[in-house]
Image (tube, rainbow, N blue to C red):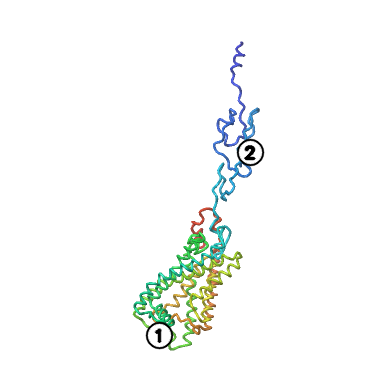
């Protein structure tokens, strides 16, 4: 054998160079030796059409069989993919529970109508809420009632009217006023917790559709309402002075309990006002409005039911007073709807009650809660007009601040029920 033949016999075969358009996941040893039997270390995402991001492997060398495509992923029936998240290769995702928050834009009244909403929930929720609220108020007021009976403040008599009058007189004392305010303030946590229990929405969503009480907006609403309501009461007091120039307010003097009464009014009246707002404009407005799928119908039903309840809670027998209370409730519902939360209506309620009660510690309190027929007059229409005015002003201010009237926090995906107020600070830049 010649030397040339011997060199040819032991010469290494030439290696075909790898193609330039190899997939990115081909390893260093793949494509050079033709070894294509091992699976890639990372696999592209899978969709209904197969493997995204690359074509199925083709033969790399003449005579080498092409690699077979990986088996397409078939999800198990009953599972669905989480929106916005890629399908994991080879494993089905866990089933996704219906969102308890709206996944499409909802206003305050229809905010409960989320994918997890059931028609029986608002009905059972309202009935059970009424029972629990009665028990809570009874527990708070029971110590005062027991003390009043044993001290003789409330006589043990069969005369029903006498007992009612004694109770009303007791409520005009500082301790009675305090007890009443605290029992109404209890509606704040009760409304939040009951909505969480029945609808799965965390307590913060009762305050606004942005998920929390917007303190900056509340403070601004207070500052706007205060001068408007001072003007309203100035006109109202002027009318009272014209009716009785000698003694328009029934006489004012410092009493032994004036300071205590004044502190009770200043410290607890805001809580009492907020409690009524969370009850009427919040829980009742939402639960009754959620029964109606139509947006306008929900606003009308929620506003009508909650405003009527607000009127009856004040126990007035005078038609003019009932007109004012119903108008107050309707204006609060409008502000809640058009500002996306309870802050505006709460601010008006607080300013109205504080300005209306500041004289109580210094005057004769006999008949303070007398709302029988004949105690009202057409002068009530002035208050109705100012309610319309302040509603217009606050809604216009909310528009300037770009406060949302509809949100869909459930569309943010898992965990959105725990999110805080999103980008609210931009409204005050």
Position of 361 relative to 425 (above/below): below
Helix, strand or loop at disc 2? loop
Q: Which residue ends up furthest to the top in the rendered image?
A: 1
Residue 104 image position (x, y, % from top left): 58, 59
Residue 301 image position (x, y, % from top left): 58, 70
Q: Residue at x 48, y 79 (%)?
A: 233
Please indicate whether residue 71 sits to the left or right of residue 325 in the image.
Answer: right
Residue 318 image position (x, y, % from top left): 51, 82
Q: Label 1, on which residue?
A: 251
Q: Residues within 10 Å of mark 1 (few under 14, many from 20)?
A: few
Task: Depth check: give the residue in front, 343 or 129.
Answer: 129
Position of 273 relative to 6 (above/below): below
Q: Label 2, on which residue?
A: 55
Helix, strand or loop at disc 1? loop
Task: Depth check: give the residue in front, 201 or 337.
Answer: 201
Q: Residues within 10 Å of mark 2 (few under 14, many from 20)?
A: few
Q: Residue at x 55, y 47 (%)?
A: 93
């Amino acid at each position: 054998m010649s030397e040339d033949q011997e060199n040819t016999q032991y010469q290494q075969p030439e290696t075909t160079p790898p193609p330039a358009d190899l997939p990115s996941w081909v390893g260093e040893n793949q494509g050079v030796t033709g070894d294509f039997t091992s699976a890639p270390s990372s696999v592209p995402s899978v969709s209904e059409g197969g493997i995204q991001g690359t074509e199925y492997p083709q033969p790399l060398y003449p005579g080498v069989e092409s690699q077979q495509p990986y088996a397409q992923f078939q999800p198990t029936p009953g599972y669905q993919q989480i929106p916005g998240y890629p399908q994991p290769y080879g494993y089905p995702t866990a089933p996704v529970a219906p969102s308890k928050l709206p996944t499409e834009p909802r206003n305050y009244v229809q905010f409960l109508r989320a994918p997890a909403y059931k028609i029986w929930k608002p009905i059972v929720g309202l009935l059970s809420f009424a029972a629990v609220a009665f028990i809570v108020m009874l527990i708070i007021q029971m110590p005062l009632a027991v003390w009043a009976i044993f001290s003789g403040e409330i006589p043990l008599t069969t005369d029903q009217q006498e007992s009612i009058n004694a109770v009303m007189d007791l409520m005009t004392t500082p301790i009675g006023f305090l007890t009443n305010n605290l029992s109404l303030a209890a509606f704040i946590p009760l409304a939040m917790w009951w909505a969480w229990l029945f609808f799965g929405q965390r307590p913060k969503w009762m305050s606004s559709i942005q998920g929390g009480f917007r303190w900056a907006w509340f403070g601004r609403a207070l500052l706007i309402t205060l001068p408007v309501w001072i003007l309203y009461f100035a006109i109202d007091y002027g009318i009272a002075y014209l009716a009785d120039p000698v003694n328009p307010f029934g006489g004012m003097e410092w009493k032994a309990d004036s300071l205590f009464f004044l502190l009770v009014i200043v410290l607890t009246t805001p809580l009492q006002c907020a409690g009524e707002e969370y009850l009427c404009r919040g829980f009742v407005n939402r639960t009754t409005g959620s029964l109606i799928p139509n947006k306008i119908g929900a606003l009308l039903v929620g506003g009508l039911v909650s405003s009527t309840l607000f009127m009856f809670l004040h126990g007035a027998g005078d038609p003019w007073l009932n007109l004012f209370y119903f108008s107050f409730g309707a204006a609060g519902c409008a502000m809640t709807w058009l500002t996306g939360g309870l802050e505006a209506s709460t601010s008006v309620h607080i300013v109205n009650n504080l300005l209306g009660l500041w004289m109580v510690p210094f005057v004769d309190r006999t008949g303070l809660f007398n709302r029988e027929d004949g105690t009202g007059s057409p002068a009530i229409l002035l208050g109705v007009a100012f309610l319309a005015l302040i509603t217009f002003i606050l809604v216009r201010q909310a528009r300037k601040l770009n406060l949302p009237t509809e949100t869909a926090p459930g569309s943010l995906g898992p965990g959105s029920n725990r999110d805080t107020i999103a980008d609210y600070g931009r409204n005050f830049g």
